[in-house]
Image: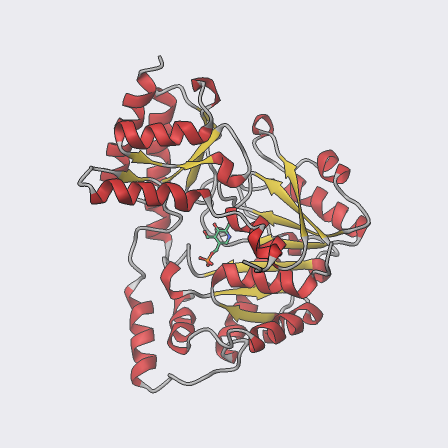
Amino acid sequence: MNLSEKIKSVEQSITLALNAKAIELEKKGEDIIKLTAGEPDFNTPKPIVEAAYEALKAGKTKYTASSGIIELRDKIAKYISKRTNNNYNSDNVVVTNGGKQALFNVLMAITNPGDEILVLDPSWVSYEAQIIMTGGTPVHIPLDFENGFQPDKKKIKRYITPKTKAILINSPNNPTGMVYSKDALQDIADIAKEHEIFVISDEVYELLVYEGTHYSISSFEGMKERTIIINAFSKTWAMTGWRIGYVVGPNEIISQVGKIQSHSTSNVNTPTQYAALKAFDVDVYPMFQEFKKRRDYVAKRLEKMNLKFILPNGAFYFFISVDEFGYSDKEFSEKLLSEVGLAVVPGSGFYKKGFIRISFATSQENLENALDRLEKFVMNFR
Ligand code: PLP
């Protein structure tokens, strides 16, 4: 059919294919454990749910300003100002339908046809697709396992051309769980200033840091003007299904982002905005502690299996090398599923072959079971 060539060129997610297979096996009555989830297994904290309910009861069910209610934009501006030592106000904020729409709107706002957007691999599945859909050209820069998947200045510089418009960074990272070091961020900041490019900083896991510190690149000298922060309530407050995130950045870009949103989706649904307003008062430390406990447990088990991985210091994923087993990451994942009923995501889905990603955003019982299965599978090769 004569449909959009641009959209046709976007690949279907490998994650979806494997998930579909897992669901098919489950339907046949097989006992499958999924470590594929990119979302907390916790329920949204009660005060947040109640705030949405109260908003509904109070008749807050009409359109709001398409960029979001002023109270929420104010709160986000204050929060990000504090985190970055910058001075943002509500005009620097657009509330979006999750981190995903935040990123889409930003790419739409900055991209002219053929502009190149740098992406550091392994990279989150939707970056490439969104860059293509918004008319840009994704340029993949492979990072090295040996270097802890930290951004590498020399490497990044090699990929800069006159067409480079922005670099898209993600720390804490999905899928590696790495938190970029201060030095690596300083290198990126230096490159961005030297070549006058934007930095799109996806910080949706910013509060899930187990060791070290998360720095927002917008807090680095001279970076506020060229950084666009993507964030969301999804991961930190267990609100994935509510669909709420936000963009914070320079006025000139934010007004374009607001325009895109006003002509496409309008505001995020109204009760959800009031729920998010409440989120800032909710202590997420207990969830964080539980994630940390699970991370330490998984690390111990993987070490016992002699698997190669870098201990994630953020987010809720392990990215594990499976190169030694003589199968591609896709084959390895398929075998894991068919032979021991364990679903994981192959690294190829994140533009990095030879790895699998497992999520520890699942119950301790599930994790124990899943790791028993992985161990059983791996032991066949030992
Ligand atoms: N960015 C990264 C790195 C993610 O892992 C995700 C979700 O998986 C998102 C953005 C999108 O978040 P949301 O669910 O708020 O759209």
Q: Residue at x 54, y 74 (%)?
A: 264
Q: Residue at x 41, y 28 (%)?
A: 331
Q: Quadrant of residue 123?
A: top right
Tell me residue 258's x, y (percent).
60, 74
Q: Quadrant of residue 74?
A: bottom right
Tell me residue 15's x, y (percent).
42, 43
Q: Residue at x 38, y 84 (%)?
A: 60
Residue 320 appears in view: no
Left-right relation of 42 to 329: left
Residue 2 appears in view: yes
> Nearest the camera: 79 or 265?
265
> Nearest the camera: 349 or 254?
349
User: Vertical placement of 242 versus 380: above or below?
Assistant: below
Q: How many marks?
A: 0
User: Vertical placement of 372 versus 382: above or below?
Assistant: below
Left-right relation of 65 to 364: right
Left-right relation of 193 to 280: right
> Nearest the camera: 14 or 62?
14
- Quarter occupied by the N terminus: bottom right
- Of all residues shown, which one is farthest toward the left? 29
> Nearest the camera: 294 or 151?
151
- Of all residues shown, which one is farthest toward the top? 382
Tell me residue 377's x, y (percent).
31, 22
User: Vertical placement of 294 versus 71: above or below?
Assistant: above
Tell me residue 280's x, y (percent).
43, 66
| Color scheme of the displayed model | secondary structure
Q: Residue at x 34, y 27 (%)?
A: 335
- Quarter occupied by the C terminus: top left
